[in-house]
Image: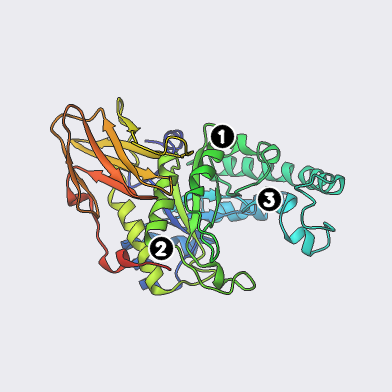
Amino acid sequence: MSALALAAFLFLSHNGRAVFPIGSYELPKDDAGLRAMAEAGINLVRCRNRADLDRAAAAGIQGWMVLPLHLGIEDGKLGRLIESVKDHPALAVWEGPDEIVWNFTAYSGLHRSGVYPSPDEWWRQSPLAVAHAEREAARIMPKLRAGIQLVRQKDPRRRPVWINEASRSDLKYIRQYSDLIDITGCDLYPIHAATRLPVSIADLTDRYRRVGPGLAVWMVLQGFAWGQLAGREERVTYPALEESRLMAWAAITHGARGVLYWGMDAAPPSEVFRESLYAVTAELSALQPFLVAPEARGVKVDVIDSEDFDKPRRGVSWICRRTGPDWMVVLVNEDDRPHMGVAVSGLPEGARLEQLYGGEWVSVVRGEFVTRMKPHEVKVFATGRRWEKIRPAGRVFVMP
């Protein structure tokens, strides 16, 4: 299958197979660290030159290449950078400038540097902020579009172009370049010392599916603690294992076609947390055939509770996939209360599914099975435990 056809299918390709991207912004400095990352299921890392791509290839994974697409093409630097790596077999994706729209509209540095007299200028839509954004967009967007078009001209494999935005980046300006790219999405790091809102990843995945209709959505998830970043928080608070699982699976059940982790290089985590994150990436990696499969037809999930009808609820998001004779059902309780009756119907009669990384098993009777779910619980069912990839050290991490 060609790179263009795979882009239309919304996944990457590696060694002739479709691949669900599990990425890391960190490229470990030592080869042992990179091998450990690859063994944990991470299959895509950020690269800045050909040497980085060589290291990724040696580890058996792929890389994405960062390009300053917004700086223009006149001086030839962008063209030379593209030419220097475009034939590399490990190169999978071109990445444009990070959070480009956010940085000239709502970025807090605009106030700190004196461009905005107050931190809420953009959200108040003050004339000063609106005028500043319009000037910057008029300067940046033509260069950004020209940069993307240059990539298209020079890359014979037509690898996908990805631009990551902030969670609240402005729709009007994103739409000024989104027709030229293949992958959109945003970063969100919702685990703080005072607040923990992992399910918010679901809402942002939904937003970016609407921001870029027809584009793949990649979500950048939390691989660090805010307390490690200078001046942010006094307390170091990592996502617990179940929060990391919830963020990854909520992104996927809401349509993300890739998940990546930021922060392991900017704020090197404790080895205990790193291992918990690797437990999640290994879990996803073991399920690759399902993650690139289409949604199974005819399957439904109904939440049939016996009480609390008057309380608002998000409900249970889900996916159901099939690969060959095997099935996978993923259920994500997005509410902070239990759901005691979750019915999954439309499955083959008599099928037996095991809860991966759990003790439950179910049999399909009259086309359905019923399960119960704790608050914010993730359940992954599959036809056999061969789909597990257990990393015991990582599956016990709890952050108070």
Q: Callout 2: helix, strand or loop? A: loop
**In the displayed structure, does residue 82 sit left or right of residue 344?**
right
Q: Residue 102 carries which label?
A: 3
Task: State whether residue 41 appears in this view.
Answer: no
- The numbered dot on residue 210 is 1
What residue is pinned by disc 2? 240
Circle on res. 11 = none
Task: Answer with mark 3 or mark 1, whichever residue precedes in sequence.
Answer: 3
Crowding at mark 2 (Cα within 10 Å: few <14, some 14-19, many 20+): some
**Three-letter code, disc 1:** Arg
Cα distance in 3D space between marks 3 and 1: 18 Å
Place of residue 44 in the rendered image (x, y in percent of width and height, measured from the top left): 42, 55
The quarter holding residue 252 reads: top left
Residue 243, position in %: x, y?
42, 57
Q: Which of marks 2 and 1 is nearer the N terminus?
A: 1
Give the distance between the C-alpha atoms of the residues marked 3 and 2, in whole angstroms: 29 Å
Along the viewing direction, whichever of 345 and 128 lies nearer the viewer:
345
Q: Which of 201 and 370 is in front in this view?
A: 370
Q: Nearer the viewer, residue 383 or 301?
A: 301
For badge 3, the amino acid type reads: Trp
Q: Which residue is drawn at 59% across and 55% down?
A: 81
Q: Is residue 272 above or below residue 198?
A: below
